[in-house]
Amino acid sequence: MRAEHFCAECGHVQPAEPTDFFSFFGLGRKLELDEAALEHDFYALSRKLHPDVYSKASAREQAWSLEKTSQLNDAYRTLKDPLLRTEYLLQLQGIQLDEQSKTATEQARASGVEKKQTVPAELLEEAFELNMLLEETKLGGLDAELRGQLSATREALKARLNTMQDELHAAWKQWDSGNSAATTQMVDVLNRRSYLRNLVRDINEALK
Amino acid sequence: MADDRVVGIDLGTTNSLVAYMGTGPTLAHPHEPGKGVFIIPGEDGSNLVPSVVALDHDNHVLVGNAAREALLTSPERAVYSVKRLMGRGVEDVQAELKLFPFRLAEDLAPGEVLRIQLGERSYTPPEISAQILRQLKRNAERFFGAAVKQAVITVPAYFNDAQRQATKDAGRIAGLEVLRLVNEPTAASLAYGLDRKQNGTIVVYDFGGGTFDVSILKLKDGIFEVIATNGDTHLGGDDIDNLMIAVAVADVAGDLGVDAREHPDLVQRLRRAVIEAKTTLSSQETADLEVELPDGRLYQRRIEREAFEHMIEPIVERTLASCRQALKDAELAASQVDEVVLVGGSTRIPLVRRLVEDLFERKPHTELNPDEVVALGAAVQAKILAGGSAETKDMLLLDVTPLSLGIEALGGVTAKIIHRNSTIPASATEHFTTGVEGQVSVAIHVVQGEREMAKDCRSLARFDLKGIPPMPAGLPRIEVRFLIDANGILHVSAREQRSGKESEIQVQPSYGLTDEQVESMILDSFDNAEQDLAQRQLIEARNDAETMLTALVKGRRNEAWTMLSFSEQRKVDELESKLRLALGGTDYHSIRRWMEELNQASMRLAELMMDAAVGSALRGKNMDSTDMGEGPEAPHPIGKAEFN
């Protein structure tokens, strides 16, 4: 069911009600999503809800338009991005992401405690080798050989990040066809992904 | 109808302009058929009002060219580039103070909004900007012969919350309801978009007098969606001038043994000379500086373009770094950009054009006057907000917030809650709790910026969430909602969820005027405005009459004149001589009366001229709209001016 945005009588904006981002666009909680159709809908709703359209309206309608448009923008921003969309769905399902998630990182920052890093099993070896390289860089500086090794590792990690895209899409398909256990798979992919990204970031910093 | 007129204002670092989008041409603008977006000129006929404010020795406020002259004769009573100080605190303007002759008031208390000394008085930056806005408002009112109360004002895309708020305050102090703050590059894209209805990705590179912005937009069927923006609110032509002045000051000290810093008027003469040289170097290979020293000797120097380009390249490189970051944020390669638009006076510099062309691998657009395009775009947005016209029907601007919004968390780190380049309006909801049993208030520090540590970001506000019912530590759940509106300005509301009690928030803006301060400034400005009203009315009536008579002289040469009947012509002639007679006197009522009569008598001439202009435009191939509505909505420009 799509959230009510307009008055059936006059077509004007209605007050914003709490609604989840999928319902805002009248979408089910599905992850494979027609991004072009979403954009089309976003533009169409923007044309009708935006504060520009209500600049001569009553203060009440202006306030509603502002609230509604912020909901619209927040929803579109979240849904159009595959990762944010996945994270948002998991959150709606009451699933907390592991230590590497962005929220976890920010929470760790907020509380000031050192963030726990659970190394995914399949990445143990690579992570270990990379740490040796980074340690060497810290001690002996960055020579041409080290630079080459770090760059090569980075490329390998980036290639793995790309394959994760496919894994994530596979999990989406599962979820969309009614397999609710697919959330476990998604959490796993997201966690490994953010771990890999952290490694890439460390390399980038070392190479700077 | 008249009171609904919404003007577009470009409140620039160096120059300011006011523009309007009507639906038809006027006698003064018969060459603008159809589109009807035009700059409203000032009393002196110039489209640009220099953003300079001065107090003369009777403490009358001077704005624009008059103030620019005062800058040379009594620099301690004049101020320019005040935009650089908008929304900033004493501690962030230290670098500015070394480069600009800003004189801060001496009695500033810590945490107080900056005040600038002008002669014996001191003013906050929003009050000085308000003087510029008031001048633009007067120019528009003279043009329309009716009050103008609402405006769209442009700001650099990279302006933070405090700078935006300060701009809005300036509008209020000037007696304008600011319907919207629009980002300058986005406004420019509207002006360009009006002409060419098309889809694609465009980059607006806006290098002005004091600020640099770059915005990347996606155009689709009239939607102007900003994808990413970047910039520097303290990087512009001013910085190039300062480099050149530094060289000149060193020359004067080394070769001629004069310390220019001891002669503020000399520094101002050097400044004017280097600006002239900079402008010359955009079209010539060399430029000559020649400035007279206080002792009568001459300082002379020739500048080669190559040396000039070498000197300014680091500045231009900083703008390119912003462009690269914006491309990265938009996840685009330079080659995926369809069009590049240049805006701002500094884009006249050949080196800037060359380097921008190299970066984006395509020739940038320069069709519209880079000084005027932002104001024209503001007028388009003003038209949209006023209800629109056939041409603006499908146009909608979706802009973004340039900087991430964050909260200072434990350990002083920034927890980002709304990321940069989020489409606005945007919101975020955060939950807070207490750390101590019975705690009844929670302090929240909101910052804006990209840095890890809150202290390196711009402090926006400190709030105290008060009135929390006493409960064990960690039990209260206070929901705080942060909302960035379509102007890019932050609003905060809070609620304690366990008790359902609306929390009381005391918002303490880190830099800014309180509502009470703004109100009292509005009152002050009225007091001053009354003083010389009568004198001003006479001067303005005379100026308006001159404008009208000039337009009439032109009108007589137009083919349309011959289409008037003999008696129509004679009536116009007769009223013209009456007006000329009244001009010799000092009674502005009488000047206005004959202007009004002449206006009525020449109405048909204006209409005929318009028809002729429209006719020729329709025959041309570039007409993008044939909808002329019901004739000129913009009133006859030779109509009555000054209202009040």
Image: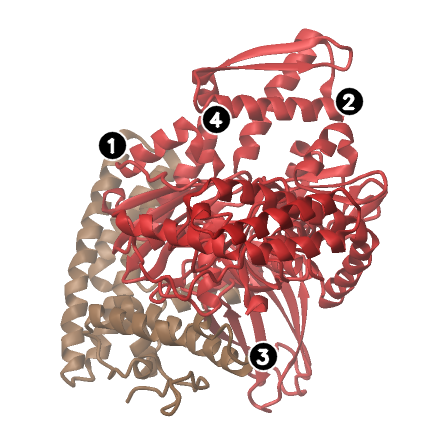
Quadrant of the rendering where the N terminus of chain B is positioned: bottom right
Give whichever of discs 2 and 3 has the lower sequence position: 2
Q: How far separated are the C-alphas under marks 2 and 1?
A: 58 Å
Report the side of B550 relative to B617 (left or right): right
Report the side of B364 relative to B527 (left or right): left
Whether residue B48 is visible:
no
Q: How far separated are the C-alphas under marks 2 and 3?
A: 54 Å
Give chain B's shade.
red
Report the side of B117 relative to B411 (left or right): right
**Camera-nearest residue between B503 and A11:** A11
Q: How far separated are the C-alphas under marks 1 and 4?
A: 38 Å
- Judged by depth in the image, the label closer to the viewer, 2 or 1, is 2
Neighbour tally class for label 4: few under 14, some 14-19, many 20 plus, Cα within 10 Å = some
Report the side of A131 relative to B634 (left or right): left
Provide the chain ID for the residue under circle 2.
Answer: B
Give whichever of discs 4 and 3 has the lower sequence position: 4
Q: Are marks 2 and 3 on the same chain?
A: yes
Residue of label 4: B312
Q: How far separated are the C-alphas under marks 4 and 2?
A: 27 Å
Provide the chain ID for the residue under circle 4.
Answer: B
Under tag 3, what secondary structure?
strand
Q: Are marks 1 and 4 on the same chain?
A: no
Residue of label 3: B494
Under tag 4, what secondary structure?
helix
Neighbour tally class for label 2: few under 14, some 14-19, many 20 plus, Cα within 10 Å = few
- Judged by depth in the image, the label closer to the viewer, 1 or 3, is 3
- Judged by depth in the image, the label closer to the viewer, 2 or 3, is 2
Which numbered dot is residue B262?
2
Looking at the picture, how far across and down is residue B281, in whole percent?
47, 21
